[in-house]
């Protein structure tokens, strides 16, 4: 116990604040010295000098906030500039911004036109993007056959998300003849390319034996893989198999756990009714 009349020393507040300022200064200096910051400055200077590719690359940095302050509006302007100067990837990036309404006012018709330009220029991701718009009838007339053609072009060009989307249409017979076996190969290609949705769709076929030999144990592996990659539909399908004891020992606790994960990852059908929109 302290002797009466003696005052305890106050904590050194100035020292604490001085250290905080010092750490902040170090963080700023460190960020400024990061090689990525110097590279971003080089891109900006090259863009200002008229290098269209540099404008596109700097726009990507601005959109992501990577070693520069995030600025979607400025990114949109530079993507448009690079697109006009013949960098078709800039057209595709700008199309995605118009779809999402990020940095620009949402305009799906404009997005479709930009995706078309990028796809025609060899940007396979935009072929998939335009296919999505045709499949949904968003910004363009709904045309499943056109969507299937675009997905096929993207898939052949190495954009494996297009393979997965083409597989979905082929299972349904939407826009092209139904062929579950061919769809399974498309899903396998997408899954091998790390597209979680392709793994789930292949698993669905393996559970039912539609177009492939039935293999519920393999389906469990695929659903688990997709769930770990944050694909909510994969978590849902895995929960269904645990609940039914198909391909895995029946375990209602595990089934419930995977259903919760599916809900958290945005698969609304797995959510309790009171939590659905």
Image (cartoon, helix red, strand yellow):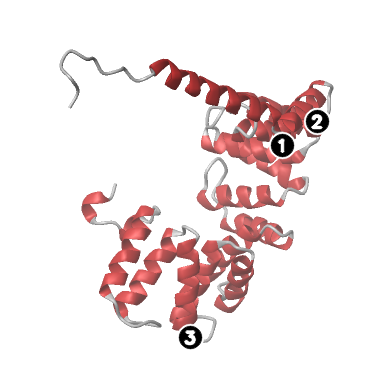
Q: Residues within 10 Å of mark 3 (few under 14, many from 20)?
A: some
For residue 219, above or below residue 43: below
Q: CA distance from mark 2 to mark 3?
A: 52 Å
Residue 112 spot, x, y in % from top left: 62, 41
Q: Are marks 1 and 2 in contact (CB under 8 Å)?
A: yes
Residue identified by numbered label 1: 90
Q: Nearer the viewer, residue 265 or 128?
A: 265
Q: Residues within 10 Å of mark 2 (few under 14, many from 20)?
A: many
Mark count:
3
Residue 127 spot, x, y in % from top left: 67, 51
Judged left or right of residue 68, residue 231 is: left
Q: Nearer the viewer, residue 43 or 27?
A: 27
Residue found 56% across the figure and 47% down from its top: 133
The answer to which image quadrant residue 46 occupies is top right
Residue 52 numbered mark, or none = 2
Residue found 31% across the figure and 65% down from its top: 257
The answer to which image quadrant residue 211 occupies is bottom right
Work out whether residue 26 can be spotted: yes
């Amino acid at each position: 116990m302290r002797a009466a009349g003696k005052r305890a020393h106050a904590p050194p507040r100035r020292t604490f604040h001085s250290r905080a300022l010092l750490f902040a200064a170090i963080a700023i200096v460190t960020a400024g010295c990061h090689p990525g910051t110097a590279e971003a400055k080089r891109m900006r200077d090259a863009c200002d000098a008229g290098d269209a590719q540099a404008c596109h690359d700097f726009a990507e940095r601005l959109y992501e906030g990577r070693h520069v302050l995030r600025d979607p509006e400025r990114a949109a302007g530079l993507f448009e500039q690079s697109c006009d100067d013949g960098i078709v990837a800039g057209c595709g990036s700008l199309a995605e911004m118009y779809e999402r309404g990020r940095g620009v006012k949402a305009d799906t018709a404009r997005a479709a036109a930009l995706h078309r330009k990028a796809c025609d220029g060899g940007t396979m991701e935009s072929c998939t993007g335009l296919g999505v718009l045709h499949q949904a009838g968003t910004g363009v007339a709904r045309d499943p056959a056109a969507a299937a053609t675009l997905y096929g072009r993207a898939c052949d060009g190495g954009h494996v998300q297009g393979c997965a989307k083409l597989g979905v249409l082929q299972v349904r017979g939407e826009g092209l003849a139904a062929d579950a076996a061919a769809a399974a190969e498309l899903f396998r290609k997408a899954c091998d390319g790390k597209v979680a949705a392709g793994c789930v769709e292949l698993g669905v076929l393996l559970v039912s034996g539609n177009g492939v030999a039935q293999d519920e144990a393999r389906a469990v592996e695929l659903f688990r893989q997709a769930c770990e990659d944050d694909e909510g539909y994969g978590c849902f399908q895995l929960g269904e198999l645990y609940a039914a004891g198909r391909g895995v020992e029946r375990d209602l606790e595990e089934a419930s756990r995977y259903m919760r994960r599916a809900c958290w990852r945005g698969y609304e059908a797995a959510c309790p009714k009171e939590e659905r929109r």
